[in-house]
Image (cartoon, rainbow, N blue to C red):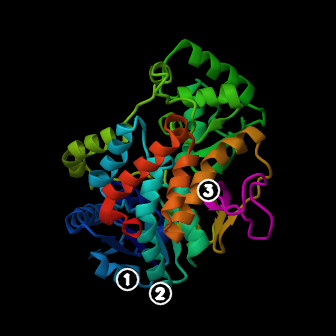
């Protein structure tokens, strides 16, 4: 059995995913091909993983492949492909995605999922992952492609609609959702044995049900506590607690993300909201700088030992190899395999995040019916620019890039139509060779 890891220069993430596989008895002794365009980062990752492999006695066999010319060799014969690339990196591309919008008065927190930052990231990433797909189709056509790359719904949705790969999009926000909420409202005692139901879109999926081990609905008490906590204190999860108060339900991804997914919280004309809702503007660039500064200290400890991470990849691979089923929250097309829709009130071609069963047959998504109308409406404000961005990537029409930006809820709330077009042009031109289809 072979796993190919694309973007293996991301050492910490590669360690989490491959380290998890080292802990699975059924995966011991498998082959792992590590691929990256940065040979130095790739060598660092290989050294960490090989040391960890020796320490755990897992018996994995590693090869390393640097540069585009080596990609097919890395993929050849793979049963599973893990995708963790970041096209353009922190510098220059992330810096560009934040600094140019600032000139127009548009502020972001993370900028990797929706908004103008998410649109730009998708348009420079989709051509790269499409090239991956063509190689997969050529040298390992039966492989499962496990996509971890943001913007999740745009990248995964494109691959599922316009390539022949077997693709599922993965994020760790689903498995952390109930835990973060119950801990946040002081109800962590209900975690053991709890039951949950989550569906929506990536980073904006909804905790539709949360019950204790006896089947009692926990939401009435959660709603009371969340409202009281927001009234009494400033804390990092105020946006999602406000969702509970105003829309009735909690959301999977963090408040720092969700602050920029709607027009409700970041407003240049209401600067007091930034403090009121504890919104960390420019958080992602700061995080990139912090991680770079801490890298040497982190690197020294990475090969010491490993405990199971919160990522899904090991469980998916293990379930497909052994036919021992597991359940995940996966990103799949909303058009149900047997007809109909997985979420009735979202479009067929939306990439949705729903419960999925995993076994030897692959990924079987669950139909979840209708979302509460207000939650579907919030999702659609993000789905619309996602679908238009996918079409922009497919057709290479700049007008569609403008339209995606014009329909993004945060961007549209802050800027005029002419400013949005001018900002989009400036971003595309600044990205230059990172977006060759539009330059």
- The disc label shown at residue 41, or none: none
Question: For the point 50% across and 83% down, which residue is it?
Answer: 137
Q: Tell me where residue 233 appears, x and y as whole percent.
A: 51, 15
Residue 73 as seen in the image, left or right of residue 179: left
Residue 350 appears in the figure: yes
Q: Which residue is mark 1?
A: 72
Q: Nearer the viewer, residue 8 or 313?
A: 8
Of helix, strand and loop, which one carries label 3? strand
Sequence-first disc among 1 and 2: 1
Residue at the front extreme, as displayed: 418
Task: Say if 184 sits above or below 65 in the image.
Answer: above
The residue stretch that appears in magenta:
328-356
Give left or right: position of 123 versus 88. right
| 1 and 2 marks in contact (CB < 8 Å) | yes
Residue shown at 51%/54% (left/top)? 402
Which comes before the other along the chain, label 3 or label 1?
1
């Amino acid at each position: 059995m072979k796993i190919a890891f694309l973007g293996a220069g991301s050492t910490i993430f590669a360690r989490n995913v491959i380290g998890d596989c080292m802990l699975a008895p059924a995966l011991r002794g498998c082959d792992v091909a590590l691929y990256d365009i940065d040979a130095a980062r790739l060598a660092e990752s290989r050294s960490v993983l090989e040391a960890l492999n020796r320490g755990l006695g897992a018996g994995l066999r590693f090869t390393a492949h640097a540069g585009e010319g080596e990609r097919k060799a890395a993929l050849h014969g793979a049963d599973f492909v893990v995708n963790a690339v970041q096209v353009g990196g922190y510098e220059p591309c992330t810096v560009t995605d934040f600094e140019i919008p600032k000139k127009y008065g548009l502020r972001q927190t993370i900028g990797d999922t929706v908004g103008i930052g998410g649109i730009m990231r998708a348009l420079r990433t989709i051509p790269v992952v499409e090239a991956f797909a063509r190689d997969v189709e050529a040298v390992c056509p039966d492989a499962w492609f496990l996509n971890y790359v943001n913007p999740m719904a745009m990248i995964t949705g494109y691959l599922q609609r316009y390539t022949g790969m077997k693709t599922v999009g993965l994020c760790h926000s689903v498995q952390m959702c109930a835990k973060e909420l119950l801990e946040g409202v002081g109800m962590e005692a209900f975690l053991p044995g709890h039951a949950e139901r989550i569906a929506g879109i990536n980073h904006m999926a909804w905790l539709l049900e949360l019950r204790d081990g006896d089947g009692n609905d926990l939401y009435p008490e959660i709603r009371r506590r969340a409202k009281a906590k927001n009234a009494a204190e400033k804390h990092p999860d105020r946006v999602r607690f406000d969702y509970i108060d105003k829309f009735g339900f909690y959301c999977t991804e963090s408040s720092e993300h969700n602050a920029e997914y709607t027009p409700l919280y970041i407003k240049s004309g209401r600067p007091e909201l930034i403090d009121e809702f504890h919104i960390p503007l420019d958080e992602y660039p700061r995080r990139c700088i912090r991680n770079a500064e801490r890298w040497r200290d982190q690197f020294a400890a990475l090969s010491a030992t490993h405990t199971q991470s919160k990522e899904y990849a090991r469980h998916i691979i293990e379930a497909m190899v052994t036919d021992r089923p597991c359940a995940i929250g996966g990103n799949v097309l909303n058009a149900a395999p047997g007809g109909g829709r997985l979420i009735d009130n979202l479009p067929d071609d939306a990439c949705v995040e729903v419960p999925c069963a995993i076994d030897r047959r692959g990924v079987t998504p669950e139909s979840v019916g209708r979302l509460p109308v207000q939650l579907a409406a919030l999702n659609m404000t993000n789905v619309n620019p996602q679908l238009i961005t996918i079409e922009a990537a497919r057709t290479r029409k700049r007008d569609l890039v403008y339209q995606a930006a014009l329909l993004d809820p945060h961007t549209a709330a802050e800027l005029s139509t002419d400013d949005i077009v001018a900002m989009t042009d400036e971003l595309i031109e600044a990205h230059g060779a990172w977006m060759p289809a539009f330059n």
